[in-house]
Image (tube, helix red, strand yellow):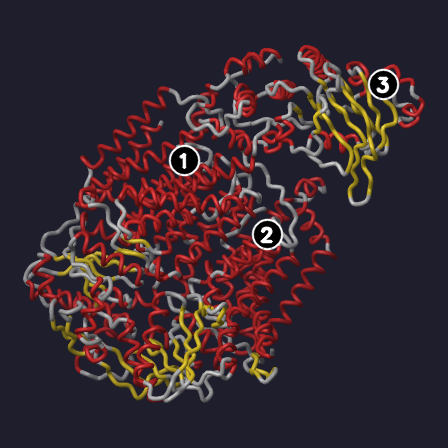
Amino acid sequence: MKTKLFLLATSATAFFAIHSASAVAQATIKIGEINSYKAQPAFLEPYKKGWELAQDEINAAGGVNGRKLETIFRDDNATPGDAVRVAEELVSREKVALLSGTFLSNVGLAVGDFAKQRKVLFIASEPLTDKLTWANGNDYTFRLRANTAMQTAMLVPEAAKLNKKRWGIVYPNYEYGQSAANWFKKYLLSQATGGVEFVEQAAPLGRIDAGSVVQAMLDAKVDAIFNVTFGADLQKFVREGNTRGLFNNRPVVSLLSGEPEYLDTLKDETPNGWIVTGYPWTEINTPEHKAFRDAYQKKFNDYPRLGSVVGYATVKSIAAMLKKSGSTDVAKMQAAMKNLEVMSPFGKIVWRAQDNQSTMGAYVGKLAKKDGKGVMVDWRYVDGKSVQPTDDEVKRLRVGAKK
Amino acid sequence: MSKALEVSGLKKSFGGVAAVRGIDFHADAGEAVALIGSNGAGKTTCFNLINGQLTPDGGRVSLFGLDITGRSPELLFRSGVARTFQITATFASMSVRENVQMALMSRHREVAGFFSLATSRHTVAANELLADVGLSEQASRPCAALAYGDLKRLELAVALANEPRLLLMDEPTAGMSPEERNALMRLALRVCRERKLALLFTEHDMDVVFTHADRIIVMNRGRLIAQGSPSEVRANEEVRAVYLGSLHV
Amino acid sequence: MTAFFVQTLNGLASASSLFLVAVGLSLIFGVTRIVNFAHGSFYMLGVYIAYTCATSLSGALGFWGGVLAAGLAVAVIGVLVEMLVLRRIYSSPELLQLIATFALVLIIKDAALAIWGPEDLLGPRAPGFTGAVEIFGRAFPTYDLLLIALGVAMLLVLTALMKKTRFGLLLRAATEDREMTDALGVNQKLLFTAVFALGSFLAGIGGALQLPREPATLAMDLGIIADVFVVVVIGGLGSLHGAFVAAIIISLVKAYCIGLGSQTLFGVEFEFSKLTLVAEFIVMALVLVFKPNGLFGKPIIHSQTSAAVELPLGKPSNIQLGALLAGILLLAAMPAVFDEYTSVLATDVLIFALFAASLGLIIGTAGLGSFGHAAYFGLGAYGAALATQAGFGFLSSLFLGAALALAAAMVFGWFCVRLSGTYMAMLTLAFAQIVWSIVFQWDAVTGGSNGLVGIWPPEALSDRDYFYWTTLTVCGVGVLVCWWVVYTPFGYALRAARDSTVKALAIGLSVKRLQWAGFALAGGLAGVAGAVYVFSKGSISPEVSAIPRSVDALVMVLLGGINTLLGPVVGAAVFTYLQDTLARSTDYWRAVLGAVILLLVMLFPRGIVGSIKQFAQRRRAA
C-alpha cells in the first residue's frame, strides 16, 4: 500500500511538472514577482494594478529590445520559507530572468539572500528594512523604496524645528518600528538644539491597546509624539487620541501616515497638523505624475495609492535596466542597475551604485481634513538622495554585506 | 511468619465525613478473602486505600511485614501487588498477547527500550500465562475483539505477569452471567492456591462470595463488623441485621 | 495613582468585548467539546456586518440596530456551520473537529475579502457616546464606560439564563456530564445547535461593540482567537464566571504593562510595553502550572477517541518492509526523473513529513494534545542557524539545533504532561507563544522579526538535488525513528498509557515520565526537521514557531490519519502540494485550501491513510 501511495504522489507531481513546463514562451522576458498578496491586500492590490499598467504601457510600445515583458505573480503566504520555495520555482521551473517584489522585511531579506545564493537578480520593491541594502545587502539585491532610516530622516528636521523636549514614541513592536524609533532618537539627538528625552510605547503589531497607550502618553506628560504605527493600529491610536485629547497642543510627527493606504481609512478622524510622510496624489501635477495618474484612473476607474506608484516604478525600472543591459545575463543586468536612471511618477530616480538603493523619495507635509476626508497640505517632495547617509557611512553600514 | 497482607487502623475521611474508621484485618498467602458491605459501607474506599488510588489518613498496610501504606499504584506493582478493575481496563490497541507482554516488559523494567521489537519480548512467558487462563487461542486477536468474560481472564493474566504476592480484584464478576462468574472465580482461586498469593476481592454477588471465599470481611458504616469463614459470617447476628436478612444463603 | 485607576478603567473596557467573545467560545466548548477556531472569524464578521449596517443606515438605528443585526446574522452563520459541517463530524476525534473549524477560518477570511475588500474599515463612533467625560482630570471615553456597564450587564443576563431557565439548566448539565443530558431525554442535536447560536451571537455582538474602537480588518480573526483561547483556558473551560474574571485579568495585565512603560529594575531599563506581545500567554502558563483546570474549571471528561479501530501492530511484515525499501528507492530516484523544482518541493515535503510524524508521536501514539509543536521546529531552526553563524559545520549545526529543541521540549514537556486534554494543548500553545515572542524580540541574538539570513548548506550540498538527497537521508532517518519507536517497548508503553492510564499505572508504568520522554523525543525530532528547514531556505524568521505553523502540522497529521504510521507523512505531502499548487493557480487559494481540507475531513474522518486502511479492512472482512 505504501508503494501505491508513493507512486500516486510522484505521478501527480510529474503531471504538474509537464503541465507548467509547456507554458514556456520564448519571445517574452519573464519576471518572477513574489508578494504577500493575500496577507497585505490593501497595499498590494493597487500595487499589482500599477504593475500591470506599466507593463501594458511598455508592451504596447513594443516591449524591451523587441521582447515583451511577462510577469508571473506568486503569493508568498507572508512567510520567508514559502517565498524562497516560490523563488526556487520561478527560477528553476519558470526560468524567469529576474525576481522582484516582496512586502514584509523578513521576506525581503530571505529572498535577497536567496538571490545571492542562486545568483539571480532581485529587485525588492517595498520592504523598508535598512538591512536589505546595508547590513545584509548583496550585489544581487536592489531596492526601490526609501528605507526606514531615510523615511525617518525626512521627518527629523521638521521634528527638530518644533523645539520640544519630551518626546513620546509609539511604534509597532517589530523590526520596522524598533528601527524607526532608534533612527528617530539618533537623528533627533544630533539635530535638536536643546536637550531631548524619550518615552516609548511598543505595541504588538495590529493589536495595540490604544486607550491604554494614549493614557500612558498623557500620564508621561510628553510634549510631542513620534508615531510609527500604521494601518489598524494607527486608526485605533488616532481615534483614542482624539477622544482623550492627546493631540491638543501636542504636535505629532508620523511616518507613512499620509499614504492613501493609511490616510483614507481615517476619514473624519484625520488629525489636523500632523507632520507626515505620504503621497498627496490629487495635488502632484508634474507631467510624469499627471500622465501616470490619468492613465491609472482611466484603466482602473480608481485612484492610485502609493502601492500603485511602487508597482509602476518597479516595472519601469526593470524595463529601463533591461534596455540598458540588452540581455538577461545576470552580470550584465547587475551592471546595468548601477546608477540606472529611471523616470518614475515621482520624477527621476537613480539606482545608487554604492548600496543598490534607489533615490525615490517621499512627500512630507501636514495632515488636514477636507470634506470629511484626510488630505496632505503644505507638502513638498523630499528626494531620497538628500536623506541618504554619507558614502563613508554607507560603506561602514555595508561592512556586513557579502558579495 | 508474617501475614501476606496486614491492615491495621486504616482510616480515611472526605471533607470531615469518615468513610473508613479504623479497620484491621489480614490475608494469608494462598487465601482468598472477600471484602463485602452494602453501598456506602466503605468497602470501595477501603479497597482503594490498599490499591494506592487513595492515601489513608492513618493506619498501616503491610505486605509480608513491609510497610506499603500510601504507596502509589506504580510502586505497589513493584512491591508485588497486582490488581484488576471493576470496569475492565485493557490496552485496546494491542493484541491479547501484547497486553500480557506489556506487563512483563514493565516487570522487567524494559519500557525505556528503544532497540527491540516489543512483540518479541517475553513471548514464551506471555503464552504460558495466557494458557494458564485459557486464552491461548485468542492470543493473537485484537484485544478489542474479545468477549467480556475473556477480557476478565485477560486482566487476570496481565495481573499474574507480575508474579504478585497479593492480588486485588475489584468486583471481578460484575456484568457476567452466573456460569461465567463461577468459572472466573474458580480460575482466580486456582491461581491463588497454585501461586501462593493472597487474594482480596470485593464483590456484591453473595453467591460468589459465600461459594468461593475462604474468609469474609464485612464492613458497615466505615467499620469492620464481622470476619470469619463463610459459615461464621452467615451466622453472625449483626451481619444479618445490617443486611436485613438479605443473606439467603 | 490616578494614572493607575484610569488604566484600570481602560483594562475593564477592553475586557468587556473580550468577555463576550470568550464566553461564547467557552459555552460552545462546554457543551460540544469543540475548540472552535472559527470563533474569531465570527467575531470578525460581527465587526464587518456592524460596519455595513452603521454606514448604510446612519444614526442611532444604524449603529445599535447594526449591533443587534450583527449578533443575529452571526448566530445564523454559526447555526449553519453547526448544522452543515460540525454535526457531521461530532463522532470524529476532537482534533479533527478543530481542523474543520480551522478550514472555516480560511474560507470565512476569503469570503470577507470578497465582500468587504482589502482595506481597513473604520466605523463611525457610537451615537450618543462620541465624546469623553472627565475622570480624575483625564478625558475618558463615554463609550468605554458604556462597554464596562454592558460587560457587567451581559454577565448578569447570562448568569440568570444559566441559573433560571431550562435551557441554562441543560447547558450546565451538558457541560458537566454529557451522559446525564442523554439520560434527561434531551434532543442533543437541538441543544448543540442552540448553544452554537448563542455562542456565535455573543461573538457577533462582541465584535460589533468593538466597531467604534477599532477598524474592521481581515486580520482580526486570528488576532482575537489567541486572546480568547487564553481567556477561556485561564477561566476554566465551560465556566461563565471564569471567562469574566479571566477577561478582566488579561486586560488589566496588558493595561498595567502599558501604564508602566519603561522602568528601571535592578539597574536595567526594562520596557514593559513590549511585554504586551506575550503577557497573556505568560499568565496562562502560570495559571495552568498551578491550577491545571483553570481558575474556575472542573476536570473535563473527554470522550474517548475511537482507538478501537486501530489494529494491533505486531511486527512489520515482509510486505511492509519491502514497500518501505521500494519507497525509499523511488524517493531517491526522483531527481533523476523530475525537474529541479520537484526536488525543492519534495525537500519541503520531507521536512514537513518529519515535523508531522514527530507530532504524530505525541498526538497519535501518546494520545496527548499539542497546539504548540512549532516551538520545537523553530528552536531547531534557530539553534542550527545560530550554530552555523558561530562557525559550526553543517552536521554539528543540525545536531545542535536538535539538541536545543530537545532541551526545550524537556523543560516545557515536564509541565505539559501534568495536564490533560485541552488544557495540556493550551499549555503547549502558551509555551510556543513564549518561545515565539522571545525569538521575535531578542534582536541581538535572533535578529528579531527579520530573523537570520545566509544560513546555507556547504557548497557541496547546495545543489537542489544534492540537498534533496541530504534531506531524504536526515529526515528519512527521522521518520524511520518515529515509526520504529512505535514498535519498541517504549512506544508500546506510550500506547498503553494512552489506552488506559489507570491500567498502565497498575502495571507499574511511570505514565508521566514516559509521556515526558515521548514529548521530549518528539520535540527533538521536530527540531531536526526545523534544522534542515533553515538550510533549505537559507534564512529563518520567527513565524516558523508561530501558531499557524503548529496548526499546519496538526492539519497534516489529521489529514493523513492519526494513529497510522504513514498518515502524517502522506498528510504532509498532500498539504504541501496543495498549498503550493493552489497558491499558484487561484487568487482565492486560501478559501479553496480551506474547502479542500473541510471536504477531506468530512469524507475521510479517519484521515486519508486511516480511511484507506478501514476500507481495506472492510473488504477483507466482507
Q: Which residue is mark 2?
A: C28
The answer to whether residue B174 is seen in the rendering is: no
Residue that appears at 46% across and 55% down: C433
Chain letter of the residue carrying label 1 = C
Give the quarter of the figure containing the N terminus of chain C: bottom right
Residue that label 1 marks? C567
In whole angstroms, how far apart are the C-alphas of marks 3 and 2? 55 Å
Left or right position of A4 against C236: left
Residue depicted at x 46% and y 19%: B120
Q: Secondary structure at mark 3?
A: strand
The type of residue carrying mark 1 is: Gly
Q: Secondary structure at mark 2?
A: helix
Q: Give the number of the mark in front: 1 or 3.
A: 3
Residue A184, position as x, y percentages in the image:
34, 77
Q: Position of residue C462 (x, y in %)?
A: 20, 45
Instruction: Read off the residue under disc 3.
Output: B228
**Circle 3 marks a residue in which chain?**
B
Q: Are marks 1 and 2 in contact (CB under 8 Å)?
A: no
Q: State how far apart marks 1 and 3 are (Cα).
A: 59 Å
Q: Which badge, 1 or 2, comes first in the chain's sequence?
A: 2
Question: In terms of secondary structure, where does tag 1 sit?
Answer: helix
Left or right, residue A169 beside residue A354: right
Answer few, some or many: residues within 10 Å of disc 1's Cα (few below 14, many 20 plus, some between 14 and 19): many
